[in-house]
Image (cartoon, rainbow, N blue to C red):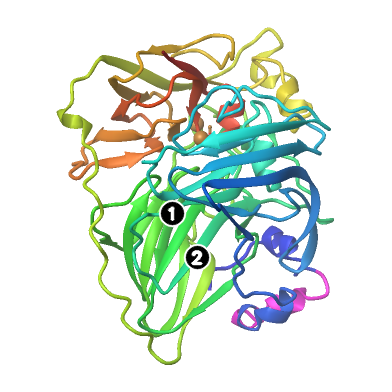
Amino acid sequence: MSPLTRRQLLALGAVGAGAAAVGGAGLWWSGGGEALGGGRGLVQPEVLTAADGLLELELAAAPATVRVGARAAHVQAFNGSLPGPTLRLRPGTTLRVAMTNRLEAPTNLHVHGLHVSPEGNGDNPFVSIDPGESFDYEFALPEDHPPGTYWYHPHRHGHVADQLAAGLYGAIVVEDPDPVPVTRERVLVVSDITLDASGDLAEVSPPEQMMGREGETVLVNGQVRPEATAAPGERELWRVVNACPARYLRLQLDGQTLWLLGRDTGRLPAPREVTEVTLAPGNRAELLVDTREGTSRLLAAPVDRGGMDGMMDGMMGGRMPGDGPGNDEPIELLTLEVAGAPAGDPGPVPAGPAPRDLRGEPVAARRTLDFAMGAGMGMDGGMMGEGMTGDGTTGGTRGPGSMMSFTINGERFDEDRTDQRVAAGTVEEWTLTNSSPMDHPLHLHVWPMQVVQDEDRDVGTPLWLDVVNIPAFGEVVVRVAFDDFTGRTVYHCHILDHEDLGMMGTLEVR
Ligand code: C2O
Ligand code: CU
Ligand code: CU
């Protein structure tokens, strides 16, 4: 039973009249049904499924009141639910989304991980939808699109972290034409949120933005520690999305046999037995769970992703953000109760296709991308300027230099500047270096990356990801095949506060 902080309890509505029960230690949680207002059974987000090669839907980003734990929370959500609906597609499907912005800030829509065109009304990160406006997106998945678990979220620069922290995200499933037989499939969208005593979204402070905000309550499908049930001998497929703006998830499931079936895109040729999987923000994992009788907990174990010690000494009076839950103790995400009559054997897992391996292919160009943090000493007074005292929540209005700077190759994001020009159809090798004391997970839109060298780790079978973690002061080498599409898009740190602060670059493929 991991202890809860007072603020977490507050977020659950458990402080106050019910606070006395907390002293009863395990009692409160084991009898948790009532304390949390019931409804602890894990729910699945609504599923919208493509038919005849098309899925058309309306998606409204709007303020919403949802229940988080036992209390009403005033959040922002897609179509009123947190997470938004799960979109189930197949390779070759066209997805049409009429997106409406009912927020007070500009927004847009990104289909994270999908291999689709970045141009026009495709997966175009430069689109901006003003409050009250709509935009019609169309995403056409190629016939050979890799199966897997993907997701969608807003991507309007300057507002991305705020809008994810507020509740705007949902899962996308691209079905495998040769599916692994399972007895049950679950989508698990993991997010985090910080609510104040009245259920409103808490304001984020500049130090939290610099570290990357971690919400105080970690949710699975919008629920606090939900409970799932299964029979022994089942094979479940769990599609886990890390939708947190900055939190890394080191997932562990005690008492069950866990297999890694896929990461980010495609699937492994054969599932690999694992004891844990770490997801940087934006990453996904497809896990097979062979159920065994008993009660298990899905945990997010502590992750050391570095920090600002040293850089911040003396500036923050010793108070470091990032001391919240998750940095020193495991967080319980959900419980799995396995009981009852054993299920029948689901049958063998068919082998998946051998993944492409770019290590044997000619490289047309090599680039280095360096991720750095520095004191953003601008004209307005550097670190102690407006950002430290002013409206840290309004994103786009902060002046340059008002906070520590977050750069790639020494530059902050400028949507009018093209940072990398790539020849369509070629393979490139990118060396990703991190000269800062904090990890930065690099995400490239449209084209997945094959990790070819990761510190000292031997990368045996091809590892394909769309978010690649670059450890503090570390280096990772990836290769990318710029196939199928041309156009202009972005790459960025998926600690979304860093992205909003400028750790993003542009790429043009022609
Ligand atoms: Cu998940 Cu460019 O983002
Ligand atoms: Cu993306
Ligand atoms: Cu970063």
User: In the image, is residue 182 above or below residue 155?
Assistant: below
At numbered mark 1, what does the secondary structure look like: helix, strand or loop?
loop
Q: Nearer the viewer, residue 165 or 6?
A: 165
Q: Residue at x 66, y 14 (%)?
A: 400
User: In the image, is residue 334 above or below residue 338?
Assistant: above
Mark 1 crowdedness (10 Å alpha carbons): few <14, some 14-19, many ≥20: some
Most extreme residue toward the left is: 360
Q: Is residue 465 left or right of residue 249?
A: left
Q: Position of residue 462 (x, y in %)?
A: 23, 41
Point out the stretch of residues depicted in magenta: 16-28
Q: Residue at x 41, y 13 (%)?
A: 510
**Amino acid type, mark 1:** Glu
Q: Residue at x 47, y 30 (%)?
A: 445
Q: Position of residue 187 (x, y in %)?
A: 52, 60
User: In the image, is residue 457 above or below residue 314?
Assistant: below
Asked whether residue 18 is drawn in magenta, I would say yes
At numbered mark 2, what does the secondary structure look like: helix, strand or loop?
strand
Label number found at residue 186: 2
**Alpha carbon separation for disc pair 1 and 2:** 13 Å
Residue carrying label 1: 175
- Looking at the rendering, which quadrant does residue 293 occupy? bottom left
Q: Nearer the viewer, residue 108 or 52?
A: 52
Q: Is residue 151 visible?
A: yes
